[in-house]
Image (spheres, rainbow, N blue to C red):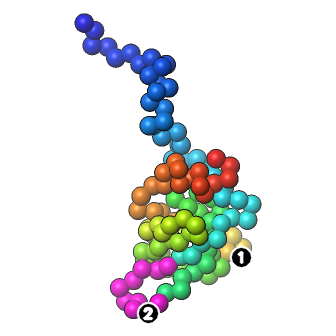
Amino acid sequence: MSLIKVQSEALKKIMMPFTSVTNPDLEYSPGKDGMAARLHKCSLECEGFDVGEKVCISRLNKRCLFLKAASPLELKASYELVLQGFYVLDGYLTPSERDSTEYCYQFHSDTWLTDEQIMKLAIDF
């Protein structure tokens, strides 16, 4: 009896749908002009209705979404990102490269995006 594990090509093909095929560092585009979303600040101090900040998603990967905003956003806060036709993602912001007219951020979700979610958001998967 051998204790060496040999994985055959047939077994790899059977297991393929259950393994992730997306590299977490690969970036995808939601379209030429990006995807509109609304970013809501979650704060215990704010009791009123938060309309949210309109942002544009320019790129995405499994770990984060790259956002562009017209005004500066607070980095020491928790946020909810609302995508039309999708759902709400909870997370936080970190600064990214600065464009001349827009403020750029990375939105880090509490959970990584799944392959199915990336397929719904990206056009060049």
* Residue positioned 59% across, 51% down in the render: 119
Between residues 120 and 41, which one lies in front from this camera angle? 120
Residue 79 on image: x %, y %: 46, 74
Q: Earlier in the sequence, mark 1 or mark 2?
A: 2
The outermost residue toward the bottom is: 48
Taking the magenta stretch, the answer to whether it contains residue 45 is yes
The outermost residue toward the left is: 1
**Cα gap from disc 1 to disc 2, whole angstroms:** 30 Å
Residue under numbered circle 1: 101
The kind of residue tagged 2 is Gly
Check disc 1: other Cα within 10 Å, few if <14, some if 14-19, many if 20+.
Answer: few
- Mark 1 falls on what kind of element? loop
Q: Is residue 76 visible?
A: no
Total marks shown come to: 2
Residue 103 on image: x %, y %: 63, 74
Q: From the viewer's perspective, is 36 left or right of 78?
A: right
Say which mark, if any, is on residue 48. 2
The kind of residue tagged 1 is Thr
Residue 26 on image: x %, y %: 58, 47
* Residue positioned 53% across, 54% down in the render: 117
Q: From the viewer's perspective, is 48 left or right of 51?
A: left
Say which quadrant the N terminus sits in: top left
Question: In the rendered image of this protein, does residue 85 appear above or below residue 122?
Answer: below
Q: Is residue 65 visible?
A: yes
**Tag 1 near tag 2, CB within 8 Å:** no
Magenta residues (range): 40-49
